[in-house]
Each structure stands twice: as C-alpha cells, then as structure tokens.
Amino acid sequence: APAVVKPAPFALVAALAAAPAGAQTSPRAPLPPPSGTIIDVTPAQASQLASVASRAPPGATNRLADGFYALGRGLVHLRTSGVTLRSLSGNAAAVVLDNNYQGGDMVLVSASNVTVADITVQRAWFHPLHVAPATGTTTGVLIHNVRVIDPGQQGIKINSNAGFFTDAGEVRCSRVELTDQGRPFIRDGCYTGGIDGH
C-alpha cells in the first residue's frame, strides 16, 4: 500500500533564508486575479468591513482599495469557506488595517481555504492575524504578502480550538515587525512572537 504522508501543520515558506549564500531568488508571483463574487470596500467603509466580511458568500473576494482602515474594536471574522481578503492594488503597504490597540484580534480566520493577502494589519490588542477553527478542522489557509506591525501579543497566531485543529496552511512572502513605538504595548509579560503555531 502507498505511504500516506500527512502535511505539516503549517508550512512557513522562507525561500530567501533557505537559499545558499549569493544565490539569486525571485519572489513568488502575485496571486491571480479574483474570480466569483467581488465585494469592493473603501477606507470610508472601514466601520462596515467587519460585517461585510463576515457575511461574504463562499468563494467571495473582499477587495480593499488603497488607504487607511481605522477598525477600532471591529473584528474582521472570515468564517466562510473559500473567502479572500486582499487589496485591490496588490501593494500590502498601501492598504493598512489599524486597530489602535482596541478590542482583541483584528483578522480572525475560522474557515477552510481562506486567503488573506496583500495587506498590512497593525496595532492589535492581541493578534493582528489569528487562525483558529470554530466548528471543524480548518485547512488550506493561505497568508500571502501580509505585513504585520506592532502586535500586542503574537503577530500571527495559529492554534486549535474546541477540539478542532488548524492544518495544511501556508504563510509566505510576509513580514512581522515590532517597532520602537509598538514595544511598550506588548501585553501580558512579553507574551509575544512573530508566528506562534500550535
């Protein structure tokens, strides 16, 4: 019988780090254009982003125009399979979701085959980006070209929940930063880190 190989819980792609010294490496190609239902959101609609994203139908793309999204206590909860949250321009630095250290998490993924791409998430009370299942094992989550800046706890948190697991996802071409301005906001006795995968 053929061997069954279980995928790693979450693949951390670090092509540049793995390359031999002096080797030429090219960045991964950008994501293909979205298909299916496209929901366009502008910075003027920042206060509505949480409700829009949570109601997106399966396979829909929430496409964010360039600008600054002041979320305050709003939680962008991606709870439907196959949903995407990404920028229109593909420039992560041009689309900034900011929590101003209010509320808890900022972007919570609790469904399979969800993509978060080409955005910046910053200044979360807890985790700017959190992947945790709700009603079953969550698989196939892709985090691509995301800038995470100044988390209150972990930058990207990936864990189990209520007996379900997060498996076979990927974090790639992304960056987690802690600035001097953000350092005083680290919470709970320095309970922090870049990527915390349970």
Image (spheres, helix red, strand yellow):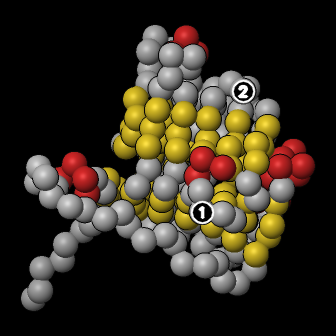
Q: Position of residue 183 (x, y in %)?
A: 51, 16
Please tell me whether mark 1 sits on a helix, a strand or a loop. loop
Q: Position of residue 41 (x, y in %)?
A: 82, 60
Question: Where residue 123 is drawn, which disc sits there?
Answer: none
Visible residue check, residue 145: yes
Q: Position of residue 137 (x, y in %)?
A: 47, 61
Q: Residues within 10 Å of mark 1 (few under 14, many from 20)?
A: many
Which amino acid type is marked by label 2?
Asn
The residue wearing badge 1 is: 90
- Looking at the rendered image, the quarter that the C terminus falls into is top left
Q: Residue at x 46, y 32 (%)?
A: 177
Please tell me whether mark 2 sits on a helix, a strand or a loop. loop
- Observer-side mark, 1 or 2, equals 1
Which label's residue is closer to the chain start, 1 or 2? 1
Front residue of 21/17: it is 21
The residue wearing badge 2 is: 100
Query: Is residue 175 depicted above or below 85 in this figure?
Result: above
Which amino acid type is marked by label 1?
Gly
Visible residue check, residue 157: no
Cα–Cα span, label 1 and label 2: 24 Å
- Is disc 1 in contact with disc 2, using a CB cutoff of under 8 Å? no
Q: Residue at x 56, y 19 (%)?
A: 182
